[in-house]
Amino acid sequence: MTQRVGVMGGTFDPPHAGHVAIAQSFLNSGLLDRLLILPTPVPPHKPDAKLTPYEHRLQMTRICFEYLERTSVDDFELALPSPHYTIYTLRKLSKQNPQAEFSLCIGQDSLNSLKSWYKWEELVSEYDIYVTRRPDATEGDDAVSSGRIYFVDHQPHRASSTAIRDFLKKGEIPEHLLCDGVPDYIREHRLYQQ
């Protein structure tokens, strides 16, 4: 029996409660059997970004999703050649796991910029794409009308990695926005300090 596996990628710098809420919305949709979380070593659209070292982002993401059923966090992209384009990641996953049917899970902001992604036409023709839609959002002019794109209901969480990093740079740890265990990890490894 084919297993339906959603793939949710990102920098997760740091991972937070909003990421878990998005993952839960995908899992609640009934469209997936499980969700694979893939922190990317270097995002292709931000090759010069100053990111927290990958091993820390990976470990924080594992802590964040530890208790969410039907999810797993993997360093799959670490073994792939750079740049880590989504189309290549999905194709490699499909080749290595022929018993699974993979799909891409993204937020609406990513959908609106999808036409800037590497080989986006092939991506939307080869894979189902599930998109979390905010209750007040419209598809907009930038939404890709071709391909297999499906919207999933989602109640947005107010956490964002950028806002959390701003707090951390000021020496504040917004524990209410982070997953249990992540604030302790940040303190122990002295992350996000200038």
Image: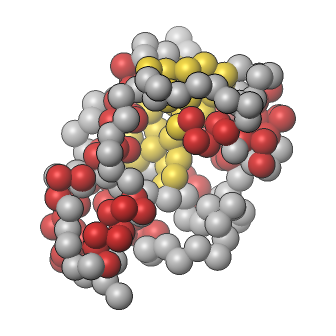
Q: Residue at x 77, y 23 (%)?
A: 145
Q: Is residue 149 left or right of residue 107?
A: right
Vertical position of residue 151 compared to residue 132: above or below = above
Q: Is residue 12 left or right of residue 95?
A: left
Q: Residue 114 in the image: state x and y as whole percent.
A: 71, 41
Q: Residue at x 64, y 76 (%)?
A: 48
Q: Residue at x 49, y 21 (%)?
A: 152
Classify residue 95 by image quadrant: top right
Q: Is residue 103 visible?
A: no
Task: Please state, as top left, top right, bottom left or bottom right, where the C terminus lies in the image.
Answer: bottom left
Q: Residue at x 80, y 22 (%)?
A: 146
* Towards the viewer: 49 or 66: 49
Q: Is residue 162 left or right of residue 130?
A: left
- Mark count: 0
Q: Residue 38 in the image: state x and y as whole percent.
A: 50, 49
Classify residue 110 by image quadrant: top right
Q: Is residue 23 visible?
A: yes
Vertical position of residue 179 compared to residue 102: above or below = below
Q: Is residue 145 left or right of residue 167?
A: right
The extreme bottom residue here reads 194
Q: Residue 121 in the image: state x and y as whole percent.
A: 83, 35
Q: Residue 65 in the image: state x and y as whole percent.
A: 30, 44
Classify residue 21 by image quadrant: top left
